[in-house]
Amino acid sequence: MSYVKYLADSLGTSENGLKLLITVYSGYLMALIHRQFPYKKYVSLQYLLFTISSLLFLYWSYGWGLLHSATCIIVQWLFFQIFRGSTVCVIISFIFQLGYLVGGYIILDSKTDYEVSWSMPHCILTLRLIGLAYDVYDGHRNEEKLWGDQKERAIKDLPSLLEMFGFSYFYGGYIVGPQFPLQRFRAMINGELTDVPGSKPNSIIPGFRRGISGTLMLGIQTYLSLTFNPPFYTTTQFQTSSFLYKIGYAAVTGHVTLLQYISIWMINEGACILCGLGYHEDKKTNTVRWDAVRNVTLHKFLLACSFQDIIDSFNINTNGWVLRYVFKRLRFVGIRAVSQGAALSFLAIWHGIHSGYFTCFIYEFLTMSVEKPLIALLHESALVNRLRSSSVLFWVPKAVGFVYLHTLLGYCLIDFSLLKSHRYLPVYMSIYFYGHVFYMTFWILLKIHNATMKPKGKSE
């Protein structure tokens, strides 16, 4: 038995899960080594450092599963050589990279439960390569037709194979994200992302502070997960519990589940801050922050009062990627619901092929379709405005929103956590689909409200 296996058994976790955590923490060692490279020099050597170190960790964790990522990188480089920055290149890149990932999910679906495998870092790579294809495409378009940050991300040249390996296997982004464009990566390599021009960034304290915060969060999450964990949903004890107990348990379990992702992202982000990738200069205030690749805003997540707050504060990089490369790219359709549906469908299939992913994102579509107009109506309410302006009761609207969100957030993650319909449907039936009923009821009421508020046509 290996030391890692022995330690994993002692901690009550899987060997692959522990290897993942060790790999994330290794980013700090790699960042400290990387900081020793003189800026603007030895660029190829930096790429080799990223590539070789990450391939060694991938082999340690997934064996020859690392060939999947190497294959997709090489194929993407060939696409650039053959199709350059054309529309065809974007289309074929999108189809191949997403198709390869889905094919991997299908092959791995023989396993009963979710397990850490080569497909996990590969889903990060899939977004990185598709995004790169779009950026190269934008770099070969007429600059006058570009909008927003397309101009900042556009790649006018074709990246070399070595650069693509370095970009894809960067120690701070290949295992759990975050997503960042090649232009930012190049700026980091060239020593431009620093608060001290010409010198290394003063980011050691911010980096380790973020890592320590993530570690503390992981400890809290691990402790809470001993009591609040999705597998308990399928037990007889849960099924026979009272309705209120089930609601409360689901509410807490959902948050504990998300804290697992948050803690890993925070730990990984610390390594990105150390090397300067997290550098962010506020031009208006001339202040420097280290949140450029932040994937979660913890205080906003913990104090969220709506699902929109969760979207804005959780998995920020992935949500931004989908907004940029899926939602906004469908502007030509002219129908917001189509763009939103396509974005959520992409997110579902990107996560995996289990039905729980799709039902979860369908529910999110229903949630946002109701929440936005409902909140808009509440903001117009005289009662709500009186409460918000009151010096004594100003907290009531936020408290109601807090209870609303924290009651329903865990509910909507039941299928996301259990994945298979024969596992999550009995759970939803035991709690009478209260979340779905809640939003369907308000959806109908909003339709009735909108119909009654429409001005009547003139009589003939």
Image (tube, rainbow, N blue to C red):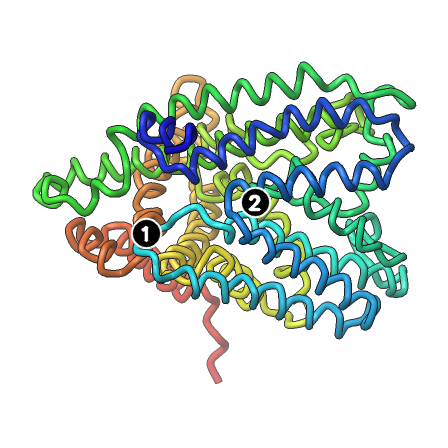
Q: Nearer the viewer, mark 1 or mark 2?
A: 2
CA gap, disc 1 to disc 2? 23 Å
Looking at this view, name the residue that lies furthest to the left: 240
Looking at this view, name the residue that lies furthest to the front: 1
Estimate the x, y position of residue 79 in percent, counting from the top left. Answer: 76, 68
Residue 314 as seen in the image, left or right of residue 166: left
Q: Specify the quadrant of the image occupied by residue 54.
A: top right
Residue visible at 50% across and 67% down? 103
Residue 88, placed above or below residue 145: below
Q: Specify the quadrant of the image occupied by residue 36.
A: top right
Q: Is residue 400 visible?
A: no
Residue 52, placed above or below residue 103: above
Residue where numbered disc 2 is placed:
59
Quadrant of the image for the N terminus? top left
Residue where numbered disc 1 is placed:
113
SS class, disc 1: loop
SS class, disc 2: helix
Estimate the x, y position of residue 283 in percent, counting from the top left. Answer: 82, 29
Q: Are marks 1 and 2 in contact (CB under 8 Å)?
A: no
Count neighbours of disc 2 (C-alpha within 10 A) and say few if under 14, some if 14 to 19, many if 20 or more: some
Amino acid type, label 1? Asp
Q: Which mark is residue 409?
A: none
Residue visible at 16% across and 35% down? 245
Residue 184 as seen in the image, left or right of residue 373: right
Looking at this view, name the residue that lies furthest to the bottom: 460
Q: Specify the quadrant of the image occupied by residue 24.
A: top right
Residue visible at 69% across and 48% down? 168
Count neighbours of disc 1 (C-alpha within 10 A) and say few if under 14, some if 14 to 19, many if 20 or more: few
Judge by depth and name the residue closer to the eye, 285 or 450: 285
Q: Is residue 144 visible?
A: yes
